[in-house]
Structure formats: C-alpha cells, structure tokens
Image (cartoon, rainbow, N blue to C red):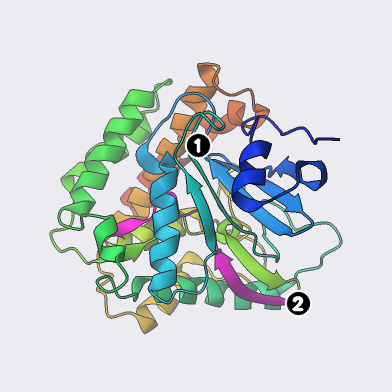
C-alpha cells in the first residue's frame, strides 16, 4: 500500500525512494498546520524523520520563497558554527517533481510554542522569564556570527539595506492594497522620511519569534533550533530587533496582535526589558530603536496584507486568512500610536 501525499507534494514518493532510499509503503507525509507562508511537511519513515519545505501554492509574493537560497542559508549557518539550525539534507530545484522547488532537512525534536500553550502543559512565569532571556540571547548570538569565513556575507547586500527595505516594503504594501487604511499609509510616509543615516551589518533572521524556535521541552526553555530562514540575509541587526519587538506582544496590546507570539503571558519580558537585555550585551547604539520598531510593525502588516490579497484572489482557501486585514489595520494603528507617543 502506497501512502497518499498531501496537497502540495503530490508524486514525491518516487523522488524520496530514489534520493533518500525511503520506502513509499512505510513513509507517511503530513502537513504542519499554523504557518502563513512557505508550506512545511513532516516526512515520517522507519529510517528517520525529515521536514520538507516548499513555496505556497499559487501566486508567489516575494523572493522569500526561494528554496535553494534558504537551503544555502542553513548550510552557511552550519559552516559558521551556528548550532541552532536543522541539518540541511537535500535541495531540489527541478519543478517537475512536485511543481515547485523544495528542500528537505532533518527534523529537530522539541517544543514549539505557537498561538496557545499545548494541551497538557503548564508553563508558568518562571518558564517564560527564562525563555525571554534565551530568546534575546539567541538573537545576539546570531548577530555576532562571522560573515566572511562562513560564506554568510555572500547572502546579502548590506549597503543601503535599511532604505531598500523601507522602499521595498512600502511598494509591496501598495501593490497588495485592498482596503483604505490611512494609518498604514501614514506610517509608510513617516518611515521614508526618517531613515537613519548610520547602518550596522550582521546576519539577520527577519522573522525571529517564539513560534520559530524549537525548545528542549516544557521543563526547559533552552533553544535547540531556530526555524524558517526564508527572509534571512545580511543587513542591519536593528531591523531584526525591530521585527522581533513588533511580534513581541504585551498584555495590553490589541488581541489580534497576540496571535503570533505568547510573549504577552505572565513572566515574559516587556518590550522595554527586551531592549534592556539586548543593550546590555550589544555594542550597538539603540538611540533610533523607535524607527526599527515602527518598521517591524509596518512589515508585519504588509506580510498580512500580501497573504490577505492572495486569499481575496482565491489562491488560498485557508479560513484563517480571511481575518488578516484586521491584523493589517491593527499594525498600522499601533505603529502610528508609537510614532505619536514616542513609546515602544
């Protein structure tokens, strides 16, 4: 009996048999739920577990869906001595196999915290306090990696990075625009007018938050691996910190912005404590951190807008996507309020 592949990886069993010597009769493939971008699948076989990643079905919305590049990022990170990545196994750019490029990596076993605490687990304030510190330390470790010897420096163009990002994400917003949200447009204008003159250079993740971390378990918030390197590049680490802060919801934030991170539960750092922890271990000047936080919120809003546009065009029937326009609205309002109050 041959198992049936889920949507998005049809006809992959012959490839798995040829390249990884996996027996189709004893290999099961299931799709991970919860993601909003690239599609991820678990390959379970008697010889081991693997994870497959491929671009979303339908309209491609950015270069972030370059599977070969993400595979190279994992290879370069391993070469740089960064141990918190799954081991890359194989990359296939032949679209005739499943209709799109894809890559396969080893599965790292552990706990991943998504939008709610898993059933049967009790995670208290002490757990989240330690997790907060570990999370910021992990970001600092990434930002301190050597760029030359590892080849990481070849994976981006740091010069003018901040300006390109502001201009690029503004263009993406207007290209994907569906509703009149004046706050998003005002924030876009403010960002373009307040681009910092000084830039820093490091390797950055660009989507660093709890649900992209594999933890040791419910009794130990040690980070075993960081996932989803699709937007990783060489750029300004403060842009990475700003995006991390944008996802770092607090108890008093709009409920809809709490759907991406459990950072609002008791015990977690506040955003200001995240900044204090980062500042205490980094030589970087955080004087303009408001700009980077506002940019992070704007980018989160644009990502939600792009996915919502794909939904309205019928490229996805995922019911979660129908409400993403409210995320866009909340990001715009929160960012504008931060600009007006000069508070993060």
Residue 311 lies in quadrant: top right
Q: Earlier in the sequence, mark 1 or mark 2?
A: 1
Q: Which residue is mark 2?
A: 219
Q: Which residues are magenta?
A: 220-234
x, y percent for residue 186: 29, 35
Label 2 packing within 10 angstroms: few (<14), some (14-19), many (20+): few
Specify whether residue 253 is in view. yes
Pointer 1 residue? 55
Specify whether 77 is left or right of 3.
left
Q: Nearest the camera: 278 or 309? A: 309
At numbered mark 2, what does the secondary structure look like: helix, strand or loop?
loop
Q: Nearer the viewer, residue 267 or 149?
A: 149
The residue lying at 59 percent from left, 30 percent from top is: 321
Residue 12 sits in quarter: top right
> Would you say 340 lies left or right of 197 here?
right
Residue furthest to the left: 197
Give the residue at x 29% y 66%.
151
- Closest to the observer, 192 or 85: 85
| Residue 75: image tag | none
Identify the residue at image location x=70%, y=65%.
109
Q: Quarter of the image containing the C terminus?
A: bottom left
Query: Relative to 203, is 71 above or below?
Result: above
């Amino acid at each position: 009996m041959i198992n049936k592949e889920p949507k998005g990886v049809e006809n992959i069993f012959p490839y798995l048999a040829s390249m990884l010597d996996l027996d189709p009769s004893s290999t099961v493939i299931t799709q991970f739920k919860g993601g909003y971008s690239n599609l991820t699948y678990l390959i379970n076989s008697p010889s081991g577990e693997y994870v497959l990643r491929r671009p979303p079905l339908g309209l491609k919305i950015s270069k972030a869906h370059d599977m070969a590049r993400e595979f190279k990022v994992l290879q370069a990170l391993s070469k740089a001595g960064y141990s918190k990545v799954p081991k890359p196994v194989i990359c296939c750019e032949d679209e005739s196999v499943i209709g799109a490029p894809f890559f396969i990596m080893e599965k790292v076993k552990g706990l991943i915290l998504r939008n709610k605490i898993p059933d049967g687990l009790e995670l208290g304030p002490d757990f989240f306090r330690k997790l907060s510190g570990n999370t910021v330390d992990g970001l600092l470790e990434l930002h301190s990696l050597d760029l030359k010897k590892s080849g990481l420096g070849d994976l981006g163009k740091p010069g003018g990075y901040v300006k390109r990002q502001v201009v690029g994400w503004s263009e993406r917003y207007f290209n994907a625009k569906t509703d009149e949200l004046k706050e998003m447009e005002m924030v876009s204008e403010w960002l373009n007018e307040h681009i910092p003159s000084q830039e820093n250079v490091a390797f950055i993740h660009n989507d660093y938050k709890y649900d992209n971390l594999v933890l040791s378990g419910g009794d130990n918030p040690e980070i075993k691996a960081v996932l989803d390197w699709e937007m990783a590049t060489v750029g300004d680490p403060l842009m990475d910190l700003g995006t991390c802060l944008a996802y770092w919801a607090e108890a008093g934030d709009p409920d809809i912005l709490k759907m991406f991170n459990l950072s609002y539960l008791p015990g977690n750092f506040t955003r200001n404590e995240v900044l204090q922890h980062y500042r205490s271990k980094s030589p970087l000047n955080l004087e303009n951190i408001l700009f980077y936080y506002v940019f992070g919120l704007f980018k989160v809003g644009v990502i939600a807008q792009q996915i919502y546009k794909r939904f309205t065009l019928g490229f996805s029937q995922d019911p979660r996507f129908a409400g993403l326009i409210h995320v866009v609205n909340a990001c715009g309002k929160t960012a504008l309020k931060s600009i007006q109050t000069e508070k993060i």
